[in-house]
Image (cartoon, rainbow, N blue to C red):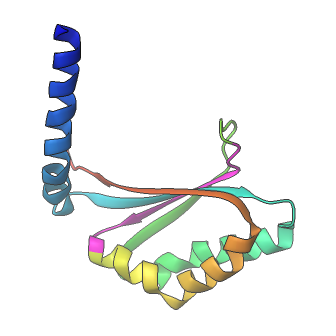
Amino acid sequence: MKKASLLYSLLFLLCLQNPLLAQEDQSRGDLFHVLLLQWNEDADSAQQAAILDLFRNLPTKIDGFEQAKLIRPIRANKGHELVIIMSFKSQAALDVYQNHPDHLKIKKLALPLLKDLTKYDYWERES
């Protein structure tokens, strides 16, 4: 019983701290937007390359969009073939990216070609 009680207490504290950490981190460090992609069988290499070129050029078009790294994992337990890690200086810059015409074009082109898409955001704190 003590172990379960301790576990619930730790989970409760983590839940309480997450919103506080997110607010604190917004003023410190970079915001990362990560995509994990798995192409479907219909996605040929030319289509993939066109989509990835659009990603590579986005940081030059949006203030506060620091970089976009495209990584092909050696191993992925869920079959993801590509990881795209984007860094932003602020939530506002990420919001601009989300509504930018080039991002909307990427979504329109890419979504029908994806078997799976996982995405998440996190703040990286400065030391």
Q: Residue at x 15, y 59 (%)?
A: 23
Picture quadrant of residue 43: bottom right
Quarter that holds the C terminus: top left
Q: Residue at x 56, y 84 (%)?
A: 104
Q: Is residue 33 magenta?
A: no
Residue furthest to the front: 1
Left or right: residue 63 compared with residue 50: left
Left or right: residue 96 compared with residue 105: left
Between 43 and 65, the residue placed more toward the observer is: 43
Residue 120 in view (yes/no): yes
Between 61 and 42, the residue placed more toward the observer is: 42
Left or right: residue 14 compared with residue 84: left
Picture quadrant of residue 108: bottom right
Is residue 127 depicted above or below 85 in this figure? above
Q: Is residue 87 magenta?
A: yes
Question: How many dots with numbers?
Answer: 0
Q: Position of residue 7 (x, y in %)?
A: 22, 21
Q: Position of residue 110 (x, y in %)?
A: 69, 73
Q: Position of residue 82 (x, y in %)?
A: 66, 54
Picture quadrant of residue 16: top left
Q: Residue at x 19, y 9 (%)?
A: 1
Which stretch did the figure color magenta? 79-91
Q: Position of residue 44 (x, y in %)?
A: 87, 67
Is residue 80 depicted above or below 100 in this figure? above
Between 96 and 68, the residue placed more toward the observer is: 96
Q: Residue at x 76, y 69 (%)?
A: 113
